[in-house]
Image (cartoon, rainbow, N blue to C red):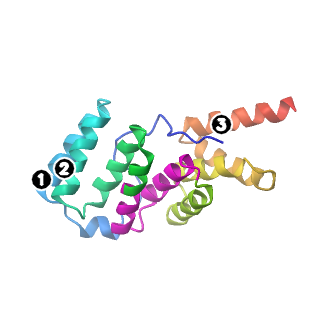
Amino acid sequence: MKIDLPPEMSGERPQGPVSVAQLRHQPSQRALHAALKAGKLSEAGDYRGAATQLEKAVAFDPQFAEAHGNLGAQYLRLHEPEEAAQEFRRALELDPASAPQQANLALVLAQLGKTEEAAHWSRRALQTDSTNALAHYVLGCLLVGHAATFAEGAHHLELAAHELPAAAHTLESLRQRLESH
């Protein structure tokens, strides 16, 4: 099953718990300025420009985990999954407890066909934050592809569907296929 980036994912700051690593690290002013500029470019649909600004942000402050994660998101939007995975991994090295980055890594790994590792990172994200819709979505998509885990996968898609219309659409498509058989 192909897992795409849900269109409703934006360049906004992820909601949810704030990690200790985020609280401890104060990004440099130059890095923060570049990251804020990147956010505006991303909102305007200029993902390449946003990536360029985030590349500057991580050059100014290599310990800026959130900038690495946001750079990974831009690379995903630019269809550069290997680069995205690298940035998500770097973000997780700096902030291992970030459920959004764990879920983002799961998404890109699923797109790269690394399904076992994607399932691992989805489950880690859900251990960190059981409400992470993207982690539910990725794990659900991975699990519904196998008869033995179909019910669990459908449950994860149902949980994700509350926040991600893509999950609701996937679930509806699965139900229609089941009814036609």
Pointers 1 and 2 in contact (C-beta within 8 Å): yes
Please state the horizontal and vertical placement of residue 123, each as a whole percent of the image: 58, 62
Label 1: state its secondary structure: helix
Q: Earlier in the sequence, mark 1 or mark 2?
A: 1
Please, what is the three-letter code of the amino acid marked with disc 2?
A: Lys
Please state the horizontal and vertical placement of residue 142, each as a whole percent of the image: 65, 50
| Residue position for label 1 | 30
| Residue position for label 2 | 56
Q: Is residue 147 left or right of residue 134?
A: right
Please, what is the three-letter code of the amino acid marked with disc 1?
A: Arg
Residue located farthest toward the right when viewing the structure as drawn = 181
| Residue position for label 3 | 170
Quadrant, the N terminus: top right
Please, what is the three-letter code of the amino acid marked with disc 3?
A: Thr
Residue 172 magenta-highlighted: no
Q: Earlier in the sequence, mark 1 or mark 3?
A: 1
